[in-house]
């Protein structure tokens, strides 16, 4: 990439040097704190992994969405607590299905129109559905999610829209 292309990338907002340096700093500090090993070879490998991670993040378009992600941070802990509760409930339901085979399993595929407006919101919704045992997001295209549910009851619960509403609320406040 020549100087003119670099200038364009910086002006277009795709990747600012300050954003890349901030990511590198967070990665390096995290690595140093969690590693606890400060031998030259390991420090070099840690530095290499941080630079490689920042490069891959840039190539994957992380910096196109980082402003949207930063706005979500204050609301994420509350969302995570709700999601943890939902994951626990789903885990218990799936465990009941496994331990008591007489309960009916009725695999169902539903299409869910996402209330989220951004790519980040769509991904959060899809991943939240997939994290809950008994449901998997199969496809996400143009704001519509195709979801496989283990039972018709879990499909109906999903269609009620609580997960959709909560994921959308992350974006709108």
Image (cartoon, rainbow, N blue to C red):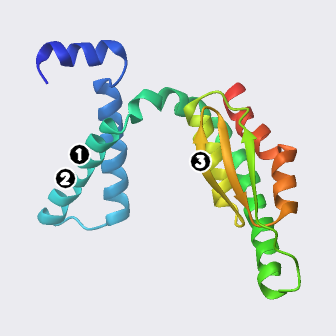
| Label 1 to label 2: alpha-carbon separation | 5 Å
Residue shown at the point (31%, 33%) measured from the top left? 20
Helix, strand or loop at label 2? It is helix
Q: Is residue 151 visible to us here?
A: yes
- Location of the N terminus by quadrant is top left
Q: How many marks?
A: 3
Q: Which residue is mark 2?
A: 48
Dot label at residue 161: none
**Residue 5 sits in which quadrant?**
top left
Helix, strand or loop at label 3? It is strand
Q: Position of residue 107 (x, y in %)?
A: 76, 66
Of the numbered discs 3 and 2, the one sitting upstream in the chain is: 2
| Label 3 to label 2: alpha-carbon separation | 34 Å
Helix, strand or loop at label 1? It is helix
Q: Which residue is mark 3?
A: 139
| Label 3 to label 1: alpha-carbon separation | 32 Å
Q: Are marks 3 and 2 in contact (CB under 8 Å)?
A: no
In the foreground, 103 or 65? 103
Residue shown at the point (11%, 20%) measured from the top left? 2
């Amino acid at each position: 990439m020549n100087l003119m292309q670099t200038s364009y990338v910086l002006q277009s907002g795709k990747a600012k040097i300050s954003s890349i340096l901030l990511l590198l700093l967070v990665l390096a500090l995290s690595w140093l704190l969690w590693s606890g090993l400060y031998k030259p070879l390991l420090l070099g490998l840690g530095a290499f992994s941080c630079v490689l991670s920042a490069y891959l993040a840039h190539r994957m378009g992380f910096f196109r969405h980082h402003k949207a992600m930063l706005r979500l941070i204050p609301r994420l802990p509350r969302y995570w607590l709700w999601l943890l509760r939902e994951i626990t409930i789903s885990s218990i339901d799936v465990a009941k299905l496994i331990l008591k085979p007489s309960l009916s399993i009725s695999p169902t595929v539903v299409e869910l129109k996402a209330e989220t407006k951004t790519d980040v919101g769509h991904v959060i919704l899809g991943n939240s559905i997939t994290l809950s045992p008994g449901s998997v997001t199969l496809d996400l295209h143009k704001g519509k999610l195709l979801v496989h549910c283990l039972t018709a009851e879990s499909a109906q619960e999903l269609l009620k829209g609580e997960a959709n509403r909560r994921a959308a609320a992350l974006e709108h406040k």
